[in-house]
Amino acid sequence: MSARLEHKVAIVTGAASGFGRATAIRFARERARVVVVDLDEQRGSETIEEVCAAGSTGRLVVGDVSALDVARRVVGEAVEQFGGVDVLVNNAGIAQDDARDTWDAAEDTWDQLLRVNLRSVYACSRAAIPVMLAAGTGAIVNVASIAASVCTGGAAYAAAKGAIVSYTRHVAREVASRGVRVNCVSPGFMRTPMTTGERLGLDEAQQEERMLAFGQRVPMHRTGSIDDVADAILFLASEEAGYITGQELIVDGGYVVR
Ligand code: NAI
């Protein structure tokens, strides 16, 4: 079987860590050339090294993907270096803290969560879609969350993720006749630095305890891996999903239907 993204050019936002990095590497194994975008230059460079180690090539753009000028710079880099944009993965995002009453979040917190998690999807899509329409082909995969469907993650985070699902459907409908597909993946409780608690200062034993507790809430009795999400993103980005658009693929071990 030939590589699933042979001759394709992909942009992956938030690819210095977690799902984004796993997706960039997974894409590289399928021969895509990858533009990695992140705020974190050091870890973004490490992703590029892994993309090259996987047998492909990539470029790093450092910047905030919620800004339209950055989004346009990213698309410009893909076109200039690799000749186009076939796949856009809008993955960059930030978590809301676990405070109980998240409706009471400060205005800055609300604005930041909506800007990074939602505006970034709009900005990168707005920059990339004209290139895809001109080529008559393209696939966008947005990373939402089960927070769009069930109460987890905080009110502002859930509002942003729910909006991604609606935005996905709407844009998919608008561009369907012109060769561009738009879908989203909604991960459940997955093991990444966003969920383990390492950023909250938990030691390794506490992180394991936290992940075990998450896993016990899942019908499959485990948390998911970054590769579970990368595989779903790859499917929606590839020709195998050529007749699928406007959909939300939930990757959660059955949590939403429990
Ligand atoms: P992560 O924290 O490991 O990686 C996110 C990356 O995005 C980081 O490298 C960060 O520097 C980058 N980033 C953040 N803001 C940015 C900005 N404004 N511009 C450019 N880069 C930026 O996160 P993880 O867990 O891999 O999450 C990725 C996506 O998946 C997020 O959208 C998150 O909301 C979503 N998600 C995560 C779940 C989980 O269990 N970890 C569950 C459901 C959804």
Image (cartoon, rainbow, N blue to C red):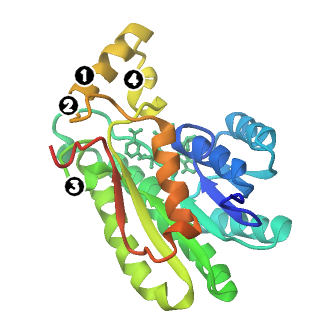
Contact between marks 3 and 2 (CB within 8 A): the answer is no
Q: Mark 4 or 1 closer to N-term?
A: 4
State the residue position of label 3: 149
Q: Is mark 2 within 8 Å of ligand 1?
A: no
Where is residue 62? Give x, y as percent: 70, 49
Q: Mark 2 or 4 closer to N-term?
A: 4
Amino acid at pointer 4: Gly
Specify whether 243 is left or right of 130.
left
Contact between marks 2 and 1 (CB within 8 A): the answer is yes
Rendered image: mark on residue 213: 1
Specify whether 164 is left or right of 21.
left
Amino acid at pointer 3: Ser
State the SS at label 2.
loop
Distance between mark 1 and mark 3 Cα atoms: 20 Å
Rendered image: mark on residue 217: 2
Closest to the observer, 121 or 246:
246
Query: Could one spot residue 62 in this view of the protein?
Result: no
The vertical placement of 184 against 23, above or below, is below
Image quadrant holding the N terminus, namely bottom right
Query: Could one spot residue 96 in this view of the protein?
Result: yes
Q: Mark 1 or 3 closer to N-term?
A: 3
Q: Residues within 10 Å of mark 1 (few under 14, many from 20)?
A: some
The vertical placement of 248 against 174, above or below, is above
Distance between mark 2 and mark 1 Cα atoms: 7 Å
Where is residue 143? Give x, y as percent: 44, 55
Where is residue 95? Give x, y as percent: 38, 41
Specify whether 60 is left or right of 218.
right
State the SS at label 1.
helix
Q: Residues within 10 Å of mark 3 (few under 14, many from 20)?
A: some
State the residue position of label 4: 197
